[in-house]
Image (cartoon, coloured by chain):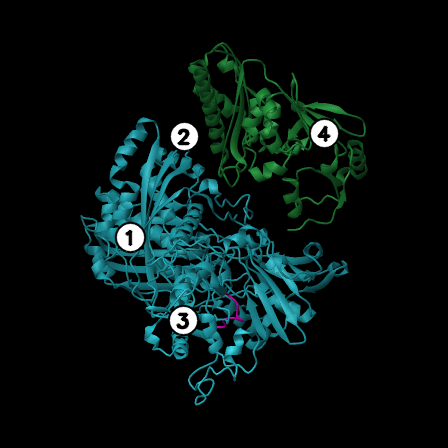
């Protein structure tokens, strides 16, 4: 299990990186944390001729928090985001979710932006980005652009990023005031790819639900967002219509069967996790009110 | 006075070195060696039509490309059948490199040797093998049906069939008031040591000799096999086992094809050659275990006493049988556990499939046997409405019945005769530990909170420390350093600690002065290997016996020097002194000096042994006729039969009423391995064993598709449990010493693994009220099983037969 030969590029700036990508085109791969790419290389499941290693590119390692949200640079490791107190205050969902990304050793090297760009349906951070209506900042030979989450993911492991483009940061947007979030997933072993997972945001005005949305892990080809508002709006959380929520989730998700679980199990699990996450928010809201 | 070391929780002496990255594993050795890589079959079953090595040669740094055609003499012949058996009527083994036919995905076809592993793999990628795919046989039902054959000349895919019977099964069964039949299944798993296989060969052209470093469980076995294959005198082959990162059974198989090819290539190329197995190779070209289908029919009376037990099982032995039928023999014999079965008949069929071969993995057939017996016990209890522990208890062999002969032939070709154990006491300890009698209260409380919990139990007896022998060599140097050698290898168990403890006690020296070498044929050329929980039993007793030889010699020499009787002497902390007169003493280093009469003094201390030192009797030869120079001694331990350890486990599990996720809330072990040399290491062995057992119960399986492709050949998809999946293990120990060996030891290495699947199945069944007949079980499977039961689509599997 050793990679096939490749040329290693070590650009020092974003323009340099973009220039190399433009030059190597489809034969290039960006290497950041390497937690998905390196095993694929070692098993020769991918054999790019060029690796553009952005590890030495300056200015990509910052987490910035502002009124609008949290901006995460392309070299920020999951562990750095997990530990970032200001980011967790601004968007508790970030820490709630990133804790579920694999294991500490992997979070120490793997990057959040890399995880988004990889667009694995089993990834946690794409679901978070989708739920908070975030964007990806892209640099390319035609200049910079921003891609909204809704326009980014086109299929499993597929995005609208061009081969000559580099995702330099993702922006997670704050939820409206009064929003509570939760993240839940279930894996065969702790830290494995989830059989199903859910990110949840419920906005309350007083005790009343005004909006509720969910995005999913491992059970949808892309992390599109399910609007739960129709079944929850106007209700107080204690009046949770579990059956209706579950039915809505079961209708939304489109899981595949694999060696770890059949689609039907994953569908059930997604629904159950959503209901339990809602119950958790309810209990939290009660505890907050008490 | 020195403290007695045996029985103490001595810290493992290996750990500082291993935990600080100073271990030396095969892959750490051999800087500058050439690297081997293999082109392996992508087909489960195919004829090899043509091999085109193409331009693989043209890559700079590629030194050699070999196919079967290139192999000379015995290297080209099939690998040995290590353990022949009269019932193994159709043994088949593979070649070092496949010729004509491949019989499982992963079988080696071409070997490449290159400057580094990257290049070797690049070259492999350029080699084209033309195959004609043949229909594969995958899974026991297909093998049993035999519509297709793995080996054309093996009818029915049956490698072996063996029947053993004790008593008159048919009459006993017919007369039994109750009968049940259970159909059971156990999935495949594998040893999966974190360090895979690996071998480094160093050919010394000047000396015409070979030194082989291998990650093996048997250095002497490998040495003999490689010498035979390469046609070398044994004296010209050395096998050294460096640190080994786990074995768990798979590394007892030898020689692996790579262990023949790598030294052969080293000799041909006149250069060190190394091969380090990668994880994917380990999954598809090493070995698996466990896969069995079983059919148990049991006859019993109103009280749950066994009257007749009829077991038939089908064992998947994979593509080849280099290790014979040891695994199914162990299942057939160790199935009986601590029980008296009444009349017993067991018959198995060992079947070929186009999958990786099957050889012992920690537990080695016992987990399957235990599963069959313990599922049967629970089924009897359910049928009669009796307490599950009570049914077991009523069938126990009693302590006063020891030694107890089950009337069968065990895996060592000797009688299955239990030497020791107190099963009622073990059960009492387990019930106390887990709170057996209070469980219904706990269950009711959990139910009120909407939770579903269950309690499971499982008992086993494990034949450990099988022969034929192990040896010990103990050598005291002139500075008091004690070198101990035994030939069996170590894979992380802590042998350097426990064997030092034994020798420290036997010889009367400080632990820190004892240095243990294992698995090095230069230090101990006579040995068998590490398997069957035999390390402590065999080598522990062997080094004890060797230490006694040295002790006797030391006393004799010291008695001469001090002019007292040996009977008046004692040895403590490396000093021989006159009992009651501690001032009159000589240290063991000095005794070692005196034991080796010298002409030349190599240091000041050695001057005492030279000819003008006045330390000897001029009337006697410097070395007596019946003596040898040096303070050293060697002895061997060779038992007449195995010694039988036992244990009982209980678990409390919680199953999620909706998602069917299973959580182990408590895991309790009562364990009897006789005298514990180091209770901490015994506990560690039990914990590790339980961890692997949990893997087999809830997580691990080999997912072959119908074409014989292994779909989960990585640690991403083969779900070996993490620390987060392994429960805290609560342990209690009984120590009923074995009467069979000087130290009273019984093996502990495999114990933790054996009953786990049975125990977890028992607990899930108790929680769910649904019979659990197949392991492992995953949440999606339990979820599906619930639905089948709710829909009434599961037929009762235990109807009266």
Subunit that carries the residue with mark 1: B
Whether the residues at callouts 4 and 2 have beta carbons within 8 Å, the answer is no
Marks 2 and 3, Cα distance to the nearest angstrom? 75 Å
Q: Position of residue B431 (x, y in %)?
A: 27, 44
Count of all numbered marks drawn on residues in the image: 4
Residue contact between numbered discs 1 and 3, judged by CB atoms under 8 Å: no
Give the chain letter for green.
A
Tag 3 secondary structure: strand
Q: Which chain is cyan?
A: B
**What residue is disc 1 on?**
B297
Mark 2 is surrounded, within 10 Å at the Cα level, by few (under 14), some (14 to 19) or many (20 or more) other residues, namely few
Residue at disc 2, secondary structure: loop
Q: Position of residue B281 (x, y in %)?
A: 58, 54
User: Which residues, given as a range, are shown in magenta?
Assistant: B518-526
In the image, is residue B415 above or below residue A238? below
Residue B87, can we see it? no
Q: Is residue B620 left or right of residue B716?
A: left
Q: Distance of mark 1 from mark 3, alpha carbons?
A: 69 Å
Q: Which residue is mark 4?
A: A168
Residue B137 placed where, x, y %? 50, 55
On the rendered structure, is B61 left or right of B355?
right
Q: Which residue is mark 2?
A: B658
| CA separation in Å, label 3 and label 4 | 78 Å
Which residue is found at the position 33% from the left and 59% from the top? B675
What number is the disc on residue B585?
Answer: 3
Q: Chain of mark 4?
A: A
- Tell me the SS state at disc 4: strand
In front: label 2 or label 3:
3
Q: Nearer the viewer, mark 4 or mark 1?
A: 4
N-terminal of the two: label 2 or label 3? 3
The answer to whether the residue labelled 3 contacts the one labelled 4, judged by CB atoms less than 8 Å apart, is no
Residue at horizontal 40%, vertical 53%? B9
């Amino acid at each position: 299990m050793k990679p096939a030969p490749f040329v290693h590029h070590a650009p020092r700036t974003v323009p340099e990186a973009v220039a190399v990508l433009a030059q190597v085109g489809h034969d290039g791969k960006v290497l950041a944390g390497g937690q998905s790419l390196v095993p694929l290389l070692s098993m020769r499941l991918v054999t790019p001729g060029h690796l553009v290693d952005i590890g030495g590119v300056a200015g990509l390692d910052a987490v910035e928090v502002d009124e609008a949200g949290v901006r995460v640079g392309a070299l920020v490791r999951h562990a750095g985001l997990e530990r970032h107190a200001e980011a967790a205050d601004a968007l508790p969902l970030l820490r709630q979710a990133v804790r579920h990304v694999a294991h500490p050793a992997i979070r120490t090297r793997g990057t959040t932006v890399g995880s988004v760009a990889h667009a694995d349906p089993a990834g946690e951070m794409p679901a978070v980005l989708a739920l908070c209506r975030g964007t990806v900042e892209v640099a390319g030979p035609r200049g910079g652009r921003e891609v909204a989450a809704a326009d980014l993911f086109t299929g499993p492991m597929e995005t609208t990023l061009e081969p000559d483009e580099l995702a330099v940061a993702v922006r997670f947007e704050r939820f409206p005031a009064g929003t509570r979030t939760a993240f839940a997933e279930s894996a065969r072993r702790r830290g494995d790819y989830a059989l199903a997972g859910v990110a949840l945001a419920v906005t309350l005005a007083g005790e009343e639900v005004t909006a509720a949305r969910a995005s999913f892990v491992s059970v949808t080809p892309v992390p599109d967002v399910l609007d739960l508002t129709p079944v929850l709006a106007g209700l107080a959380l204690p009046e949770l219509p579990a059956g209706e929520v579950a039915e809505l989730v079961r209708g939304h998700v489109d899981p595949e069967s694999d060696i770890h679980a059949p689609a039907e199990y994953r569908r059930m699990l997604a629904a159950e996790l959503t209901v339990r996450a809602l119950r958790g928010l309810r209990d939290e809201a009660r505890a907050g009110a008490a | 006075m020195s403290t007695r070391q045996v029985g103490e929780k001595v810290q493992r002496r290996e750990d500082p070195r291993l935990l600080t990255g100073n271990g030396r594993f095969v892959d750490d050795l051999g800087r500058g060696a050439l690297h081997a890589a293999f082109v392996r079959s992508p087909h489960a079953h195919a004829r090899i039509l043509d091999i085109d090595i193409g331009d693989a040669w043209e890559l700079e740094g590629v030194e050699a490309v070999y196919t079967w055609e290139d192999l000379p003499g015995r290297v080209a012949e099939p690998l040995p059948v290590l353990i022949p058996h009269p019932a193994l009527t159709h043994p088949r083994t593979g070649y070092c490199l496949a010729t004509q036919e491949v019989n499982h995905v992963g079988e080696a076809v071409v070997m490449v040797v290159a400057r580094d592993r990257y290049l070797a793999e690049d070259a492999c990628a350029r080699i084209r093998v033309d195959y004609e795919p043949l229909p594969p046989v995958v899974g026991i039902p297909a093998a049993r049906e035999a519509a297709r054959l793995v080996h054309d000349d093996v009818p029915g895919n049956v490698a072996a069939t063996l029947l053993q019977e004790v008593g008159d099964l048919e009459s006993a069964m017919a007369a039994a008031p109750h009968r049940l039949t259970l159909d059971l299944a156990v999935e495949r798993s594998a040893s999966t040591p974190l360090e895979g296989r690996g071998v480094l060969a160093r050919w010394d052209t000047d000396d015409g000799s070979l030194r082989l470093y291998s990650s093996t469980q048997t250095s002497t076995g490998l040495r003999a096999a490689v010498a035979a294959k390469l046609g070398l005198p044994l004296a010209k082959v050395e096998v050294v086992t460096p640190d080994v990162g786990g074995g768990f059974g798979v590394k007892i198989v030898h020689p692996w094809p790579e262990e023949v090819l790598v030294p052969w290539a080293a000799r041909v190329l006149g250069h060190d050659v190394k091969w380090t197995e990668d994880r994917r190779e380990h999954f598809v070209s090493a070995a698996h275990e466990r896969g069995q289908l079983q059919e148990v029919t049991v006859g019993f009376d109103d009280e749950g006493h066994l009257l007749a037990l009829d077991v038939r099982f089908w064992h998947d032995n994979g593509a080849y049988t280099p290790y014979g039928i040891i695994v199914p023999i162990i299942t057939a014999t160790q199935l009986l556990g601590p029980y008296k079965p009444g009349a017993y008949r067991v018959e198995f069929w060992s079947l070929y499939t186009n999958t990786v071969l099957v050889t012992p993995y920690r537990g080695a057939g016992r987990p399957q046997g235990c599963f069959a017996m313990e599922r049967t016990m629970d089924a009897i209890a359910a049928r009669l409405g009796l307490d599950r522990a009570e049914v077991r208890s009523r069938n126990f062999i009693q302590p006063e019945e020891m030694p107890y002969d089950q009337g069968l032939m065990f895996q060592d070709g000797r009688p299955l005769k239990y030497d020791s154990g107190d099963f009622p006491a073990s059960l009492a300890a387990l019930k106390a530990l887990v709170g057996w009698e209070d469980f219904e209260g706990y269950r009711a409380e959990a139910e009120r909170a909407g939770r579903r919990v269950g309690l499971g139990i499982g008992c086993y007896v494990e034949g450990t420390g099988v022969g034929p022998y192990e040896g010990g060599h103990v050598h005291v140097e002139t500075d008091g350093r004690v070198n101990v050698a035994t030939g069996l290898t170590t894979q992380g168990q802590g042998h350097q600690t426990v064997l030092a403890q034994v020798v420290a006690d036997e010889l009367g020296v400080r632990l820190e002065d004892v240095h243990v070498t294992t698995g090095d044929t230069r230090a101990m050329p006579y040995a068998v290997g590490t398997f069957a929980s035999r390390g402590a039993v065999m080598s522990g007793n062997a080094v004890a016996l060797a230490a006694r030889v040295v002790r006797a010699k030391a006393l004799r020499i010291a008695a001469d020097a001090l002019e007292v009787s040996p009977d008046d002497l004692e040895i403590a902390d490396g000093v021989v002194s006159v009992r009651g007169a501690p001032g009159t003493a000589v240290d063991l280093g000095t005794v070692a000096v005196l034991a080796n009469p010298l002409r030349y003094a190599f240091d000041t201390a050695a001057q005492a042994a030279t000819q003008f030192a006045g330390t000897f009797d001029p009337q006697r030869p410097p070395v007596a006729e019946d003596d040898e120079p040096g303070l050293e001694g060697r002895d061997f331990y060779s038992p007449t039969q195995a010694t039988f350890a036992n244990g009982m486990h209980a678990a409390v599990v919680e199953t999620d009423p909706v998602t069917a996720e299973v959580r182990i809330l408590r895991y309790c072990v009562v364990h009897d391995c006789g005298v514990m040399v180091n209770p901490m290491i015994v506990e560690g062995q039990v914990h590790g064993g339980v961890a692997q057992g949990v893997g087999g119960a809830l997580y691990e399986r080999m997912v072959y598709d119908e074409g014989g492709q292994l779909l989960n050949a990585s640690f991403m998809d083969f779900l070996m449990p993490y620390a987060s999946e392994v429960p805290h293990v609560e342990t209690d120990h009984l120590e009923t010493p074995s009467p069979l060996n000087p130290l009273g030891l019984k093996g502990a290495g495999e114990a933790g693994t054996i009953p786990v699947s049975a125990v977890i199945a028992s607990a899930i069944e108790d929680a769910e009220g649904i019979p659990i007949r197949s392991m492992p079980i995953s949440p999606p499977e339990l979820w599906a099983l619930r639905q089948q039961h709710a829909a009434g689509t599961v037929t009762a599997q235990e109807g009266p037969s």
